[in-house]
Image: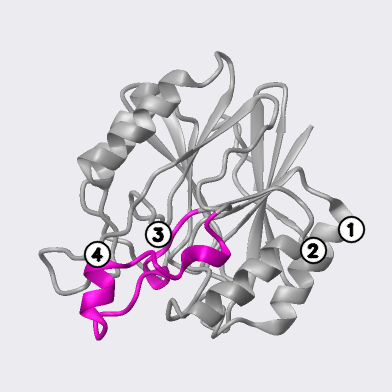
Amino acid sequence: MITLFHVSDVHFGAEDPEAIAWFGERVAEEKPDAVIMTGDLTMRATRREFERGGDWLRSLGVPVTLEVGNHDIPYYWDPFRRLFAPYQRYVAIEKMIEAELDLPGVTIVPLKTTARAQWRWNWSKGRVSPGSLRRALAMIAQAPRGNLIFVAAHHPLVEGGTKGTAKTRHGDSAMTALAEAGAHAVLSGHVHDPFDVPVERSGRTIRMIGAGTLSKRVRNSRPAFNEIRLADGKFETIARTMGREPQRAISEDPEHPRV
């Protein structure tokens, strides 16, 4: 069995020290095969926040792959850096960004959903560009036959019924394209509450899975992360909430869900 820990929105600069320690203890004791971080490692994309976040991820002692979130890009009040040098401060984590994971039976495919600028006021929301989608589809096409395929993005491509929203432009059509290409799930963050919902596309079911937050910026749930267990070509998601027993989310089999 392969075990993945899916974590998101740690927001160094506004992190919850107790939640950070709790997650580190779970990694040390349970030794997952890898950690998938779906963005917003930092709060304001400062060099110091990236250094602290990178040190923390490396301290986990397991393979890590990291997506970029909207908080990992300089804010609007630094327009020159945001538009022309948004990745300048990534040196502390660059080796982990979209790092390939060598795991039997599963392929992790990155999908960029952040944008330096958009034709709307709220640039924190998601956007899937044609180029980002093409790259993801090409990686899916190259995945070993029979692998479970997880797409890792920061923003949910479609809404998961949470208080926070992503309003990801071109997310719905991207979801359809990913399902048709053979993806089994899209892992995301951004909304700070865990969810796992089946989405029907072109006669297939693709799961939209969101992780909670390890920051002080909680919404409807306490700090949380997802545990994903893979075995025999199937997978299940377990929402792990700080201070509670693990709570099983929807099963990998949409015809026989377990709650």
Which mark is first along the chain, 3 or 2? 3
Kindly identify which residue carries mark 3: 161
257 and 149: which one is in front? 149
Label 2 CA crowd tier, 10 Å (few <14, some 14–19, many 20+)? few
**In the rendered image, which quarter is residue 27 located in?**
bottom right
Give the image location of residue 253, x and y in percent. 59, 30
Mark on residue 243? none
CA gap, disc 3 and disc 1 = 32 Å
Task: Please say if 151 is above or below 10.
Answer: above
Give the image location of residue 68, x and y in percent. 44, 59
Cβ–Cβ below 8 Å for labels 3 and 1?
Answer: no
Q: Residue at x 55, y 13 (%)?
A: 145
**In the rendered image, which quarter is residue 79 located in?**
bottom left
CA gap, disc 4 and disc 2 = 39 Å
CA gap, disc 2 and disc 1 = 15 Å
CA gap, disc 1 and disc 4 = 39 Å
Kindly identify which residue carries mark 2: 245
Kindly identify which residue carries mark 1: 29
The kind of residue on which mark 4 rests is: Arg
For the record, the magenta segment spans 67-94
Which mark is first along the chain, 1 or 2? 1
Kindly identify which residue carries mark 4: 116
Q: Residue at x 70, y 83 (%)?
A: 17
Cβ–Cβ below 8 Å for labels 2 and 1?
Answer: no
The kind of residue on which mark 1 rests is: Glu
Which mark is first along the chain, 3 or 4? 4
Give the image location of residue 218, x and y in percent. 53, 79
CA gap, disc 2 and disc 3 = 23 Å
